[in-house]
Amino acid sequence: MPLNPLEQARSAAKLLQLREQLQSGALNPIEQVRITAEALALYTALGGAPMDGPKPVDAEQAAAFAADDGLSDDPNAENYRYKDTGYIAGSRKEEAAELIRGARASGTMLRASDIDFTAIEANPREAKKLITKSNLFGVVDWSGLQAGGMDPAAGFLLDRAYASVGKEPGENTPEARKSFVLGMETLRTRMEGCKTSKDVLAVMDDIRDELMGAKLNADETDQYKTLSQQSHELYQRSQALRDVQAGLSDSMNRASQAARTAKYDIEKRLSRGWKLTDEHEKAVTDAEAESRKATEAWRQNLEQNREALDDMDNQRRVLSKQQREIVDIAKVRNLKSPESQAWLSLGERFIKAAMFRSRAGSSTFRDHAANALAGEPKTWEWAEKDTATVEKKVTQKRRTFALKVIDVFERKGGRTVPINSTKDLETLCGFRAVQTGNWVQKDIDSAKWHVEQAAGAMCDMADMLGISEKALGFGGRLGMAFGARGTGNAGGATAKGTYEPIHRVINITKMNGGGSLGHECWHAVDNILHSVLRGEDGGAEDFASANPSLMPEGPIRDAFTSLKKALTEGDHRLPESIKFTDRQRANARHNIDSPHNEVSRKIKAAGSAEAAVLAVDSHFSGIDSERLLKLKKQWRTLAAAYYAPEGVSDIQLNTGRGVSKYMAEAKVLDGAKSKEYWSSADELSARAFQSYLEDRLAEKDRQNDYLSSLADNKHHYFPEMGEPFKPYPEGEERTRINAAFDQVFQALREEKAFEKALENTALLDSIFGVHHD
C-alpha cells in the first residue's frame, strides 16, 4: 500500500538518519547489518529500488560479535551494560532530573537549552519517564495572553493546538526526546505571540510546510524569485506576441465577414431582380481584397513568430524545472532539519492538526478553526482551568458546521486541455471574463494551477452533462474569478467559493476554493437558465430549483419540478414544538380517557404523543376546509397534552411536515439560525449536484477533486465525536436525486435549450446587457 504524506515524511527523515549512521564508520558489524536491513526496507517502502549499502560481514565475524556475555546493548534493558552501578548524590543526571521535577511542580516551561540531555540519557528509562508533556510543557498564562491583546477565539484555537501534542515523544530514542522538547518550546514561542485566530492558523500552516519540507532558505528563495521573474518576463513577451496574433485574427475574421456580407447583399439583390451597379460589384471586390490582405497579414505574423514563441515556451519549461529542483533539494534538506524532527516528535494527533486543511488532516481541528474564524468563543470562560491542556468537548451549540476542504487534488481521466492563460480559459468556456486578485498576479504558479484546474474541471463537467463547456458560460454572460472578490460567510464559515447572482460571477477563493467549482456552476445554471429560456430577466434571488415555475412550461419545467420533489419531499418528519395550557391538558383527559368519537379513540390507541399526533394527521389527511383544519389543530394539541409529562407546557415531537431525510439533516445543520442556509432549496440542489457529478464520474472511473470533492457523508459524519452531520444525500435518496438530475439534463439536451437560447444574441443582450467578444 502506498505511503501517505505523513508516513513519507517520517520514513524519508528516518532513512536519512540511518544513512548518516552507516556512513559514519562508527558502527560495529552487527549494528551495520541491522541498520542496513532497516534502511533497505525504508528505501523500498518509499518506492526506491534496492540501493547499494555496506557489505554484510562474514559468519565468523558476526558470531564473534554475537557472543553472549550476559549483558545487553539495549539502554532500556535491565541488564544494560552501561547502567548505573549505584546512586551518587549530586550527580549531573540527578540534578537534571530534579530540574525537570521542579519545573513540573512550579508549572514552568523548560526549554531545550535548560536540560542536560547527556546526563538525562545516562539512564534511558528515567529519561523516558522524565521527558513528557506533563513535566515540560508548563502552565499557560492565559490571563497574561488576554492582557497582551489575544482574542478569546484565538486563545481557544491555540489551546486546541496544545491539546493535540502527544503525552510523550513518538519514539523511545534520545534524538526523539530532544526533538520533543524542542518542538514544545518552539510551538509555545511561536503561538504565544499570536493575537488573532488567523495568526494561529498561519503558524499552523508554517508548521505544516516545515513538516513536509516545503520551506526555502534565503538563497533558495532568491533563486526561486529570480526564476519566477524570468519566467514572468518570458510570459509577458510571449503574451504580447500572442495578443498581436489575436488582434490580426480578429481583423481577419471581421474582413472575412465583411466580404461574405457584401456577396450576400449582391445575391439578395439578384434574387429579387434588382439592378446591380458598379458600386455593388466594387464593394465585393474591395471586401474580398481586404479579406485576403488581412489573412495574409495574419499568416505572415504566424510564421514570423512561431519559432520565437516555441523558444520562449521551451525556456519557461526549463525555468519551471529548475524551480522544481530547488524545491526538491530543499525538501531533502528540510526533512532532516531540527524543526521537521521536532514537529514529527509531537505525535500523530498534532501532525493531523497541523495538516487540518488536507484530506488526511484532523476534522476536529478543522471545525475548531471554522469556529474561531467565525469569532467563537467570544469570552475567556473556557480558560478557567488548572492547566492548558485539559481536553474540552465543543458543544454542538458552539460549533459552526463547515464543509471540509482538501489541499491535495487529483484528476483521473478526461480530456487533455491545453490552457496557457486566463484568456484561453475565457475562450474555452465562453466566460464573460476571468478575474484575478492580487495574489494571482504576484504568484504565477498558483494562477497557472487554478486556471488549468478550472479548465479541466469545466470540461469534465461538460462531459458528464452532455453540454459543451462553452455553453456553460452562457455565451459570455457568466464571469469567473479566482480570489478576486473576497470571501463569503456561507453557513457561518469561510466559503470555498461563491456565486454572486447580482453580477453573475463565480469566485473561487485562493486557499479553499478547489472542490467547489461544480457547486457554484450549478448555482449559476439554477439562477441564469430560466431567464435565458423565458427571454426576460429574473431577480437575483430567483433559483429554478426553489421555484420550478420560473421555467417555461414543458419538459424542462417538469424536470425541475421532479428535482425539487426528490430533494425535499419524503416521509421523514421534522421536529416541532406543540404548546398547551393546563386547561387543554384537563380537556384532553376528559375527551380521551372516555373516547366518544373516532379521533379520540385513535389518540387513546396510539400509546405515545408522537404516534397520537400522527394519528390525528392521518385522520384529517386530504382536507382543505378551514373549519376542519382548525379542528385538526385543536385535536393535535389535545393529543400532545394528553401524553405530555406532568409539569410541562410544551413538548418537542417529530410530527412536523414530512420531508426527505436529506432536507431533515440540512435542518440540523441550520440549527437555530433565523434564516435557512443549508436547507434552502438552492443550497440543497448545489450540494446534491456535487454528489451527482462525483457519482457519474466514478461510474466512468474518473475523478476531479477541483470540480467537486468529499461529497459523501463519510467525510463529515462522526457521531462518536459529537458531530452528527450529513450534508449530502445518501442511499436510496441519493440514487433518486441523481435520476432527477439525469432527467433535467436530458430535457435540456433534447430541447436544445442552451443552443437555441445562445443563438439569439440580441435577446441575450437585451436581458444581460451587450456582450462584446
Image (spheres, grey):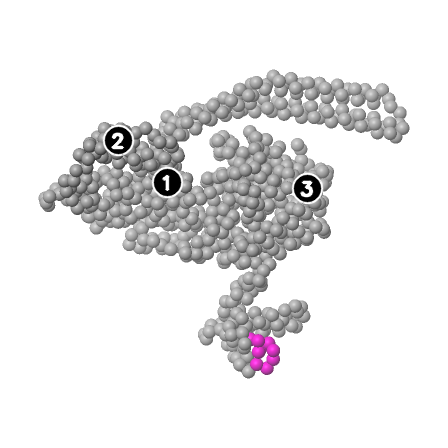
Dot placed on the residue nearer the N-terminal end, 3 or 1: 1
Task: Please indicate, yes or no, whether residue 40 appears anywhere in the rendered image.
Answer: yes
Q: Secondary structure beneath disc 2?
A: loop
Q: Position of residue 189 (x, y in %)?
A: 31, 41
Q: Nearer the viewer, mark 3 or mark 2?
A: 2
Mark drawn on residue 754: 3
Which region of the structure is painted magenta? 595-603
**How many numbered marks does the figure carry?**
3
Q: Position of residue 321 (x, y in %)?
A: 45, 26
Q: Secondary structure beneath disc 3?
A: helix
Dot placed on the residue nearer the N-terminal end, 1 or 2: 1
Whether residue 204 is in magenta: the answer is no
Name the one closer to the observer, 484 or 323. 323
Q: Secondary structure beneath disc 1?
A: helix
Q: Residues within 10 Å of mark 3 (few under 14, many from 20)?
A: many
Residue position marked by numbered label 1 in the rendering? 7
Q: CA distance from mark 3 to mark 1?
A: 49 Å
Q: Nearer the viewer, mark 3 or mark 1?
A: 1
Q: Quadrant of residue 659?
A: bottom right
Please identify the quadrant where the C terminus is shown.
top right
Q: Residues within 10 Å of mark 1 (few under 14, many from 20)?
A: few
Q: CA distance from mark 3 to mark 2?
A: 72 Å
Give the residue type at disc 3. Answer: Phe
The extreme front residue here reads: 59
Dot placed on the residue nearer the N-terminal end, 3 or 2: 2
Residue at x 43% of width, y 28% of height: 324
Q: Residues within 10 Å of mark 2 (few under 14, many from 20)?
A: some
Residue at x 32% of width, y 34% of height: 40
Q: Position of residue 537 (x, y in %)?
A: 68, 45
Compared across the picture, whether 45 is left or right of 237 comes to left
Whether residue 602 is in magenta: the answer is yes
Residue position marked by numbered label 2 in the rendering? 56
